[in-house]
Amino acid sequence: MSDPRRTARCLIELKIISLEGLWLRYWGNGGSASAFDFDAFQYGIREPPPYELAVLAWVMEDLEADSPH
């Protein structure tokens, strides 16, 4: 997955998960950005550090594993 923010934005737009729900999963996986910064990262207002993108990628993998195929 090259940039997990694109996938995250799609899931939010499709109402599969809320931004708050996504942030809670991100935070639970070790992310350190505040909810405000996380929102800014998702929409390209601020560029996240590489580690924060890695955490978001883990969340996207977890969501994919949890979804019925």
Image (tube, rainbow, N blue to C red):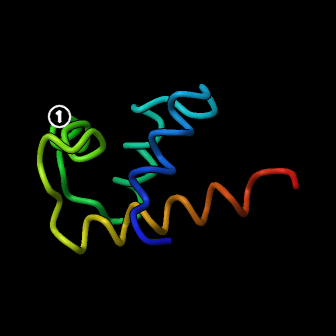
Q: Quadrant location of residue 49?
A: bottom left
22 to the left or right of 27: right
Q: Residues within 10 Å of mark 1 (few under 14, many from 20)?
A: few
- Residue 17 image point, x, y percent: 56, 34
Name, please, the residue furthest toward the right.
69
Q: Amino acid at mark 1?
A: Phe
Q: Which residue is mark 1?
A: 36
- Seen in the picture, residue 50 relative to 25 is either above or below; the reply is below
Helix, strand or loop under label 1: helix
Compared to residue 19, the image places residue 24 above or below, namely: below
The quarter in which the C terminus is drawn is bottom right
**Residue at far left of view:** 46
What residue lies at 17% left-to-right and 59% top-to-bottom? 48
Front residue of 28/65: it is 65
Q: Residue at x 18, y 51 (%)?
A: 33
Tell me where residue 54 appears, x and y as whole percent.
35, 72
Q: Residue at x 37, y 67 (%)?
A: 55
State whether residue 49 is above or below residue 19. Answer: below
Q: Position of residue 30 (x, y in %)?
A: 32, 65
Number of marks in the image? Answer: 1
Q: Quadrant of residue 63?
A: bottom right
The residue that appears at 11% across and 47% down in the rendered structure is 46
Q: Is residue 68 left or right of residue 52?
A: right
